[in-house]
Image (cartoon, grey):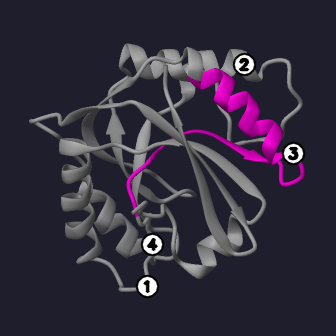
Amino acid sequence: MRRPFMTHPDQLASLEGQQYLVLRPTGPVSEAYRLVQGELLARVPERTKHPHTEHVTLRGFFEPERREKVAELVREWATRQHPIEIIADAIDAFPAPWQVVIMRLARTASLLEAYSSLTAALEHTDFRRLDERPLDDWIFHLSIVYGKTLSPDAWAELERASRRELTERPRCIVSEAELVWYEDGAEHAEVIPLG
């Protein structure tokens, strides 16, 4: 059964009307992520928000009326996209104002190609894109814990305790993407094979 990415009612409400193209890591990357997330969640208050499942976001959209058009573009992009290699490099953090502990990923050739080819596919559309950045500025990552509700001191401690390089650098190959959308307070998804 498909494990949802977000489950907290506040998160689901805040995502209403949005769509995301994501990759779901497997094997060693997933195992390392869940181990680190478990360790970090034990250090923060119980109600601290976090993703329910590991995922790499390639793009976000706000197209509640044109979701199917977004899906058509993503399906077409996916037919030309080869499987994507994901390698975890480090546990890092986006500082204030974001305050998110992340698993930072290596900029593998296939991950860079996926982002670049998706940018090219979107170039002539007017889809409303969320938090989009140029490839050179994008940090590929998996969010682990959202620390925005923590006190400044608690966040500083979590950030300091979290940062570290990963000596084993877990890796996996992802052969499908997921288009995830939020509607009527629930998460929905379409799994789209790559290549």
Residue 8 image position (x, y, % from top left): 53, 78
Dot 3 or dot 1, earlier in sequence:
1
When the figure is inspected, residue 14 is found, relative to residue 193, above or below; the finding is: below
Label 1 – label 4 distance at C-alpha:
17 Å
Q: Is residue 172 left or right of residue 181?
A: left
Residue placed under numbered mark 3 in the picture: 66
Q: Is residue 14 left or right of residue 79?
A: right
Residue placed under numbered mark 2 in the picture: 121
* Residue type for callout 4: Pro
* Residue type for callout 1: Arg
Q: Residue 152: which numbered mark, if any?
A: 4
Residue placed under numbered mark 1 in the picture: 47
Residue 58 image position (x, y, % from top left): 56, 36
Residue 88 found in image quarter: top left
In the rendered structure, are the residues bearing label 2 and label 1 in contact, judged by CB atoms less than 8 Å apart? no
Dot 2 or dot 1, earlier in sequence:
1
Dot 4 or dot 2, earlier in sequence:
2
* Residue type for callout 3: Arg
Label 3 – label 2 distance at C-alpha:
16 Å
